[in-house]
Image: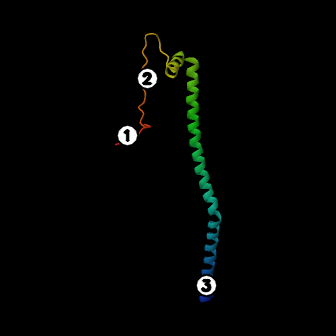
Amino acid sequence: MGVDLGIWGKLNRALIFLLALAGILGIVVWYLPVIKQNEAMRKEILRLNQEIRREEDKARQSKAMIDSLQRDPRTVERLAREGLGYAKTNEMVVRFVPPSTNSTNPVRR
């Protein structure tokens, strides 16, 4: 039953193709902001997961420090010596002073 419509048949097929193409393009344009928002949220999730891992590491280190301070007297002694400058009898304490690189009086020539 193929009736040859000539140019009108070709125009109808072209019109249907262009309408389908416009529909697909409309869908892409409609969902493009959603896709970009989804990508931004995924990046934010990755950043937050990395931050969570860093904070968990800090918490583990703090817990280990607290445990060592509660259970190990040598740790308390070491911290007291470093922080307060204490020394045992007949023990010499050597303190290193960092050199000052920023002088208040500039050298003039």
Left or right: 42, with 99 as reference point: right
Q: Which residue in the rendered view is the most extreme toward the front? A: 109
- Residue at 58% x, 27% y is 63
Q: Which residue in the rendered view is the most extreme toward the left? A: 109
Quadrant housing the N terminus? bottom right
- The amino acid marked with disc number 2 is Arg
Q: Give percent across and percent down for residue 26.
A: 64, 69
Q: Are marks 3 and 1 in contact (CB under 8 Å)?
A: no
| Whole-number angstrom distance, CA of label 3 to CA of label 1 | 88 Å
In the image, residue 65 sits, relative to residue 30, either above or below, namely above
Looking at the rendering, which quadrant does residue 36 occupy?
bottom right
Instruction: Give the residue at mark 2.
Output: 95
| Whole-number angstrom distance, CA of label 2 to CA of label 1 | 29 Å
Q: How many marks?
A: 3
Instruction: Give the residue at mark 3.
Output: 11
Crowd band around label 1 with a 10 angstrom C-alpha radius: few (<14), some (14–19), many (20+): few
Q: Name which of mark 3 and mark 1 comes first in the sequence.
A: 3
Secondary element at tag 3: helix
Residue 107's tag is 1
Crowd band around label 2 with a 10 angstrom C-alpha radius: few (<14), some (14–19), many (20+): few
- The amino acid marked with disc number 3 is Leu
